[in-house]
Amino acid sequence: MILSDEQVTTDEVKSWEGLHLLHFSGSSCSQKVRTLLREKGIDYVSHHINLVKHEHASPWYLGINPRGVVPVLVHDGVVHVESNDILAYLDGLPSEVDSYFPQTPEERAIVDASLTLENDLHFALREITMGFIFPKRLAQKPDDVLAKYEQEGADDPSRDKEIAWWRAYAEAGVTEPQARAAVKAHRGAFDALEKRLEKNEWLIGDRISVLELAWFITMNRLRMGGYPLEIHPRLFKLYNRLLKRPAFARETKTPAILSKILLPAVRFGQVLRGKRMKDVAADILAA
């Protein structure tokens, strides 16, 4: 999706030359895009937007993307948003690597439907992340940040949904019904992917595609939250095969403070309270 000049009020980016990616290290949508860029060997200028420091709610960033989310691609001054649209655009750029999108109408329809499902699970994936990986006291956005987020930038219905979600999260966190629904939705999606792998090694066609890029990031995030991916043996095998590719493996690396301190502390608290994913959603995860 390309934003119009009227939607982009941070004029600075309109003069940028070349390929620029505005992204955050832990953003699942950013991870998809970075993986494709590395797989295809496409050079770009990196602009890290620190979501922890709420840089996405700054007037400068909201003047680039009124939705206040990452990633954003700027190519020769033209602003592109929506991660799956960015994937399609990047795939069309000159590269010695074959396309990650299928060429037949039938296969393209399958890919479009699967990417739509992956996109529709955006808030459910966030509920997995905030419910089972990050503690609420560190993840929630302060009232003043949400007020700024709401007031700055051009009006955008998608930003309104983001703000509503974060306000509800600040008030109640991720509730158990929300967490269970998020796990159930992903279980259904993974079951469908498992079925696609009954006769093929890849999710579409006879080689890696954009579906592996998109769903690998989701699989990895769910595993971080405690999801037992091995209940889908073919999908688990695909996940491990993708882990051997450097572009994919790089996105599974977590900072030491997260892997050695924060996550173990969160897990310990969940054990004490009986709030691990396998406690909250045991019936849903039953193989």
Image (cartoon, rainbow, N blue to C red):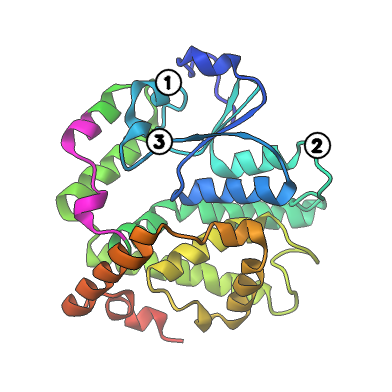
Residue 147: horizontal and vertical position, in percent? 21, 29
Residue 215 vertical position relative to residue 50 in the rendered view, above or below: below
Residue drawn where x is 52% and y is 81% of the image: 230
Residue ID for mark 1: 63
Q: What element does badge 1 sit on?
A: loop
Name the residue type under label 2.
Answer: Pro
Q: Which of the two residues, 127 or 217, is positioned nearer the viewer here?
A: 217
Q: What element does badge 2 sit on?
A: loop
Q: Please state the extent of the stretch shown in magenta in the rendering.
A: 134-147
Which mark is nearer the camera, 3 or 1?
1
**Which residue reaches farthest bottom?**
287
Residue 95 vertical position relative to residue 107 in the rendered view, above or below: above
Of the two numbered discs 1 and 2 on the same chain, state the one appearing first in sequence. Answer: 1
Residue 190: in sight, yes or no? yes
Q: Is residue 152 magenta?
A: no
Q: Which of the two residues, 9 or 190, is positioned nearer the viewer here?
A: 9
The reply to whether discs 3 and 2 touch (Cβ–Cβ < 8 Å) is no
Residue ID for mark 2: 94
Residue ID for mark 3: 158
